[in-house]
Amino acid sequence: MKNFSNFTDYSRKEDLHFESKAVHGALGHDPFSGAVSMPIYQTSTFRHRALFDSTGFDYSRLSNPTRLELERTMAILEEGVEGFAFTSGQAANMAVFTLLNPGDEVLLSDDIYGGTFRIGNDIFTRYGASFTYIDMCDLTLLENSFHENTKMVYLETPTNPMMKVADIAAIARMAHEHGCLLVVDNTLMSPYFQKPITLGADIVVHSATKFICGHNDVLAGIVVVNSDELATFMHGQIKTHGNQLAPMDSWLLLRGIKTLPVRMERHAENAMKVARWLRAQEKVKKIFYVGFEDHPGHEIMKKQCSGFGAMISINVDSFETVKKILRRVDLVMFAESLGGTETLITYPRTQTHESLTEENRQRLGITDSFLRLSIGLEHADDIIADLDQAINGEP
């Protein structure tokens, strides 16, 4: 019997397209049985044949065949050195921030996911790290924000929920000139539309609960690193903290990844149609969508991404309209999260960004008339029809 962990990752072949890599993953099948679908290795431990004669697996906290296939697949898709699967996006971020030492500073996007803000301000500040939030679209501001103790730059692009776009390659050069790591949250784009490591990022994180899973049925996080040194650190982190993803959840993510390319194309196609319709509505006063040519980050998106994604944020004319929309939507569901097959509408002020102070929400534009949509895979006409009756129908 061959050692599972020594099998070649044939999907790293340069002649394979992203779609083929997503379908076949790292191994493409179970090397033990030939099963086309990687089995769920629901076991905590592994039998050794003799002393110093192992299959390559010892204990599932350290490594598990199902999780390893997911981790290798994500490393291939993100074009990184190694991947790691965690119990949630928050767990993935927690693991990344354990790279910090007391006294270290992190520069972050000012429009950051509320959970990431909470990790910094509520947890790691207690251990002596500091967190500075700036507009990553302003490269001059960023350049002037580095200090001797700055060790990491952490950005979302596009940001959630204001859809700000940062130039990953330019920020990577700047971060490395100052001896800092660049971490990019790639949740909103997925590796299908954006590959931060190829643009210079050191670490990519995902809330894999979102587009990587794609079906609103798993909580998971992914970290992909660009060096053996970072990989060694992450192995030690996951071994010690025990925050690894379970085999069943790993298998569900592997299944979701197989359809990632076709899902992302449909998400983006639908989002463009919905965004154009929303823009024509009298009660929609402002729309935040990176696919429009007049979006401030549109040209950067075209440079570093192959698509515009599924996310749209809007300002409507009043809080009364917000309440009406959230009460009347039917096909579109009022729920947290994003990236699934279903179209979801979210009220960031009290959901995803409730951890921010009211002053910061107002400064960013997360007001009481602000809504965020994750456009799903339904027929675009049906999504629009439901939004039409919710926005324009009788109270």
Image (tube, rainbow, N blue to C red):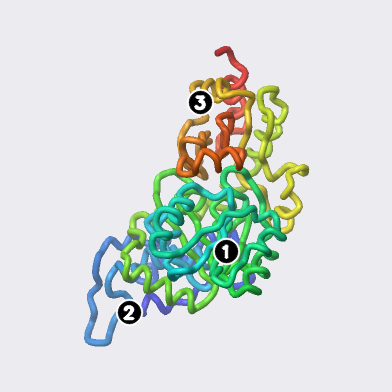
* Amino acid of disc 3: Leu
Q: Which residue is mark 3?
A: 326
Q: Based on the displayed image, in which of its 4 quarters is residue 241 positioned?
A: bottom left
- Residue depicted at x 62% and y 47%: 309
- Residue depicted at x 60% and y 23%: 318
Residue sitting nearer the eye, 161 or 76: 161
Whole-percent x, y for residue 70 in the image = 44, 63
Query: In whole angstroms, how far apart are the C-alphas of marks 3 and 1?
Result: 36 Å
Which quadrant holds the C terminus?
top right
Q: Based on the displayed image, in which of its 4 quarters is residue 306 positioned?
A: bottom right
Q: Which mark is residue 153?
A: 1
Ranked by sequence position, the earlier of labels 3 and 1 is 1
* Amino acid of disc 1: Val
Query: Is 155 above or below relative to 202?
Result: above
Query: Of tags 3 and 1, which is closer to the observer?
Result: 1
Query: In whole angstroms, how far apart are the C-alphas of marks 2 and 1?
Result: 45 Å
Please identify the residue farthest to the bottom as the structure is shown: 52
Q: Which mark is residue 1?
A: 2
Query: Of tags 2 and 3, which is closer to the observer?
Result: 3
Can residue 272 be seen here? The reply is: yes
- Estimate how packed mark 1 is, as few (under 14), some (14 to 19) or many (20 or more) residues with alpha carbons within 10 Å: many
* Amino acid of disc 2: Met
Query: In whole angstroms, how far apart are the C-alphas of marks 2 and 3?
Result: 57 Å
Ranked by sequence position, the earlier of labels 2 and 3 is 2
Ranked by sequence position, the earlier of labels 2 and 1 is 2
- Estimate how packed mark 2 is, as few (under 14), some (14 to 19) or many (20 or more) residues with alpha carbons within 10 Å: few
Whether tag 2 and tag 1 are in contact, CB under 8 A, the answer is: no
Picture mark count: 3
